[in-house]
Structures are given as structure tokens and as C-alpha cells.
Image (cartoon, rainbow, N blue to C red):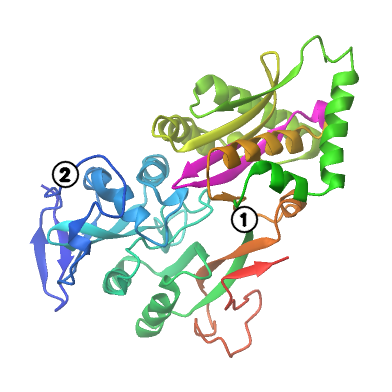
């Protein structure tokens, strides 16, 4: 039995058993959790053990789909696998809100070890995740408040805050400001990155026609140039697009090789060339594929991988996370060609959004002018109080009040 702390609304601390869980059918919909419909007392429990963490799997993603943190990087698959690979010598600080003995909210956090890194409070997945947040049902601010208040309850476990990639429109912001003020934790909101996105409306033909003649001509011209070499072939093999939803170690090996060639040519960085990140991806990508959370587009010449778009698919949104192309054929814009085919497939499957995720690379703005803003809440000595919108931001800090911007 694992012993954790449970917090009731009247702040009574008792010992509980997190192994008592509610098991039910393996679906993810907003009607799966009857405990969310009422307005009864909410209690929080601190999970500090990987085994107890694993027991949350049956309902973790059900909580995600009901929350404003409903993204591919909030899923159990992504965050639990990340903790298995990067949790060594770190302290798990996973706060779970319960109602009727059933989990209804999650604060997926950990604390640095205090030796090789500061004892900062961070999100699980931080560094590799493009989005992170507290996970609680929409229209239930009481659950979100309990989770964030519980963070302050455990103030003795961490020294400072470093919470990255929270969307600017997140309801967590106001509650986090309150925690910082109540706990005398000097922290400031900073902009980290813009995340372009494209709402998918209408059919592909109409959208592609609206991309403009210049864009379409460029794609057609590159394909014609490719086809004109060796009578329509390069090294005897035609260019073909492959759409796949599962990957294996062979695919990852190809991605590593292609990423290495690209880095040698122009210094382009890739998580596949960082050993710890690569080992994590070797495990999490096949897992997400088996659970219908992966979408990969490839350009191949025969069996050779020349370009790819690695994306995630979650609740009708397709996320473009990593792309590479063979620098030998840079003049043929293979990255653009693979993205066109990838986007077309997403349109035809009825997805409702293409999320280009964090980063402001120019190619993304050929597709959309819409952006979301990601923020970080970071402790700083002599920082202005978080949430003081009227005060001028300190060095390196930008106060953001809008949730979306357009370019």
C-alpha cells in the first residue's frame, strides 16, 4: 500500500490508499464520468510513486478530454512514458483531485532533484511538450482551485516555480497568480513562443485553391522538376507519399539517420539526435500509434525515406511536431510537398484543426495567420507580482493579456 496525503476542503489531513480506483469501459468521452455532474466536496491526494501513477491510466484521458488542457501532450501515454524515462532522481509531485473516490482533476508536476538541477516545480513532459497545464473539467473552477491550492500546501517540497508552455487563455493563470501571492513566491509571466494553428473548414479543394497561385505553382513546379529527371525518376525510382498511423524501430532508425544528415548539412537540431530524448521517442511513438494517436506522412523514393512529417492526432486535432527532409534534395522542397499531402489527408478525414505547435518558422505562416501564445510562470528575484498587468514588465518578461494573435 502506498501512503499519500489527502486534502479535504476543511484542510484535514488523513491517510488514504490511492489503489482504490474506479474502473470502467475503455472509452474517452465527456459523459464517462458521472462524478463530474454534481457539486460535492473535492479532496486532493498527492501521488509520489510511479506504481500509483500507473493506476490512474483507466481514467486519465477521460479527464483530459473534458479539460481546457485537451491536447496530445496531456495524455497518459505521453506523460507517464516521459516520467519513466526522465524521472530518475526527481520527485514526482502528482496531485489528483477526487470526487466520490473517483479522480476528476490532475496536476501533473515534478520537482528537480536539488543537486544537478534546482528544486523547481515543473510540469511532467516539460522540454519536449509543446503544451502543458493543470487538467480539470471545464466549468468546474472549484476543482482547478483545489489542485492549485494543493500546490501551495506542499510548498516545503519545492523552492521555485518554472512552469512552461501554458496557453495564454488558460483558466489556470488567475489561480496561479493567487498561489504566488499567498505563498510569497515572486514569479512573473513570460511569453515563450507563438503556436500557429489552422481551423479546418470546408473541403480541401476550396482551401488549397485559396492558398494562392504562387504557392500552388511552387509545389507543382518542384514536382515537375523531380519528374523530369531521368524521365520521371531519380535513381530509377518515383516519388511517392505514404500515410501511416503506426511506427516501429525501423522507422525511428530512418528518422535518426535523416536527422543526422540534415544536421550535418545545415546544423538543424532534432530531438532524435539527443540520446535521452531518442530513447523516450522510441517507446512513446509506437505506443501512441497503437492507440490511434499518431499521424505520419512520408515521402519515399523506393524504400528510401526522403522527407517526413511526424504528427499526433487527438480529439479531431492533428499536431505537426517534427519534420525533416534529405538535404541532398533541398532544391525540390520535399518538406513542403510532404506537408501538402499530410494536410490534405487531415482535411479528408474530417479533422477540425491543424496545429503547427510551438515555433514561428516562416513556412507555417504560408498556411495560417492565426496564433496562440504560450506562457511560462517563472520565479525570479525581485520579479514584479504575476498578474499585475498594469505594471511594466521586467527585463526579459512580457505580460500577455490576449489569448490569440494574428500575423
Magenta region, main secondary structure = strand
Percent across and percent down for residue 378 are 51, 70
56 lies above or below 251: below
Which residue position is annotated with label 1? 197
Percent across and percent down for residue 197 are 62, 55
Percent across and percent down for residue 43 are 18, 67
- The kind of secondary structure element at disc 2 is loop
Please say whether residue 79 is visible from this viewpoint.
Answer: yes
Q: Which residue is pictured at 81% across the width and 35% down the height?
A: 333
Percent across and percent down for residue 346 are 58, 40
Please say whether residue 88 is visible from this viewpoint.
Answer: no
Tally of numbered tags: 2
Q: Is residue 159 left or right of residue 14?
A: right
Q: Is residue 213 left or right of residue 155?
A: right
Q: CA distance from mark 2 to mark 1?
A: 36 Å
Magenta residues, as a range? 310-330
Q: Is residue 176 left or right of residue 298?
A: left
For disc 1, the neighbor class at 10 Å (few under 14, some 14 to 19, many from 20) is many
Magenta includes 135? Answer: no
350 lies above or below 157: above
**Image-quadrant location for residue 111:** bottom left
Q: Which residue is pictured at 88% across the width and 33% down the height?
A: 221
Which label sits on residue 65?
Answer: none
Which residue position is annotated with label 2? 23
Q: Nearer the viewer, residue 357 or 385?
A: 357
Magenta includes 313? Answer: yes
Q: Which residue is pictured at 79% across the width and 30% down the height?
A: 327
Q: Which residue is pictured at 54% across the width and 19% down the height?
A: 250
The residue most toward the bottom is 390
Q: Nearer the viewer, residue 197 or 31?
A: 31
Q: Can you say which quadrant of the picture contains the C terminus?
A: bottom right
Q: Earlier in the sequence, mark 2 or mark 1?
A: 2
Amino acid at each position: 500500500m502506498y501512503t499519500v496525503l489527502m486534502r479535504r476542503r476543511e484542510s484535514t489531513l488523513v491517510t488514504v490508499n490511492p489503489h482504490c480506483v474506479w474502473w470502467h469501459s475503455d472509452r474517452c468521452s465527456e459523459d464517462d464520468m458521472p462524478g463530474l455532474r454534481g457539486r460535492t466536496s473535492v479532496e486532493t491526494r498527492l501521488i509520489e510513486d510511479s506504481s500509483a501513477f500507473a493506476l490512474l491510466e483507466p481514467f486519465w484521458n477521460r479527464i483530459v478530454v473534458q479539460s481546457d488542457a485537451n491536447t496530445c501532450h496531456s495524455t497518459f501515454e505521453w506523460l507517464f512514458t516521459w516520467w519513466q524515462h526522465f524521472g530518475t532522481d526527481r520527485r514526482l509531485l502528482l496531485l489528483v483531485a477526487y470526487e466520490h473516490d473517483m479522480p476528476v482533476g490532475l496536476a501533473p508536476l515534478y520537482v528537480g532533484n536539488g543537486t544537478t538541477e534546482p528544486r523547481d516545480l515543473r510540469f511532467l513532459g516539460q522540454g519536449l511538450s509543446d503544451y502543458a497545464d493543470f487538467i480539470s473539467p471545464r466549468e468546474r473552477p472549484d476543482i482547478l482551485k483545489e489542485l492549485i491550492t494543493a500546490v501551495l500546501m506542499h510548498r516545503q517540497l519545492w523552492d521555485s516555480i518554472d512552469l512552461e508552455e501554458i496557453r495564454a487563455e488558460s483558466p489556470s493563470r488567475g489561480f496561479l497568480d493567487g498561489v504566488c501571492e499567498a505563498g510569497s513566491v515572486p514569479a512573473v509571466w513570460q511569453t515563450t513562443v507563438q503556436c500557429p494553428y489552422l481551423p479546418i473548414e470546408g473541403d480541401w479543394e476550396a482551401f488549397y485553391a485559396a492558398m494562392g497561385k504562387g504557392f500552388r505553382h511552387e509545389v507543382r513546379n518542384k514536382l515537375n522538376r523531380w519528374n523530369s529527371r531521368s524521365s520521371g525518376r531519380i535513381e530509377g525510382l518515383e516519388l511517392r507519399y505514404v500515410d501511416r498511423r503506426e511506427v516501429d524501430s525501423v522507422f525511428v532508425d530512418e528518422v535518426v539517420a535523416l536527422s543526422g544528415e540534415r544536421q550535418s548539412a545545415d546544423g538543424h537540431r532534432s530531438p532524435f539526435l539527443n540520446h535521452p530524448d531518442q530513447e523516450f521517442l522510441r517507446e512513446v511513438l509506437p505506443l501512441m500509434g497503437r492507440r490511434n494517436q499518431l499521424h505520419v506522412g512520408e515521402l519515399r523514393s523506393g524504400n528510401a525515406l526522403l522527407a517526413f512529417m511526424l504528427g499526433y492526432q487527438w480529439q479531431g486535432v492533428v499536431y505537426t511536431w517534427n519534420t525533416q527532409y534529405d538535404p541532398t534534395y533541398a532544391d525540390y522542397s520535399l518538406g513542403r510537398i510532404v506537408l501538402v499531402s499530410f494536410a490534405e489527408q487531415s482535411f479528408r478525414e474530417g479533422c477540425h484543426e491543424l496545429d503547427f505547435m510551438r515555433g514561428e518558422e516562416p513556412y507555417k505562416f504560408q498556411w495560417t495567420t492565426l496564433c496562440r501564445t504560450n506562457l511560462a510562470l517563472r520565479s525570479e528575484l525581485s520579479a514584479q507580482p504575476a498578474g499585475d498587468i498594469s505594471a511594466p514588465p521586467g527585463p526579459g518578461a512580457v505580460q500577455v493579456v490576449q489569448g490569440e494573435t494574428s500575423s
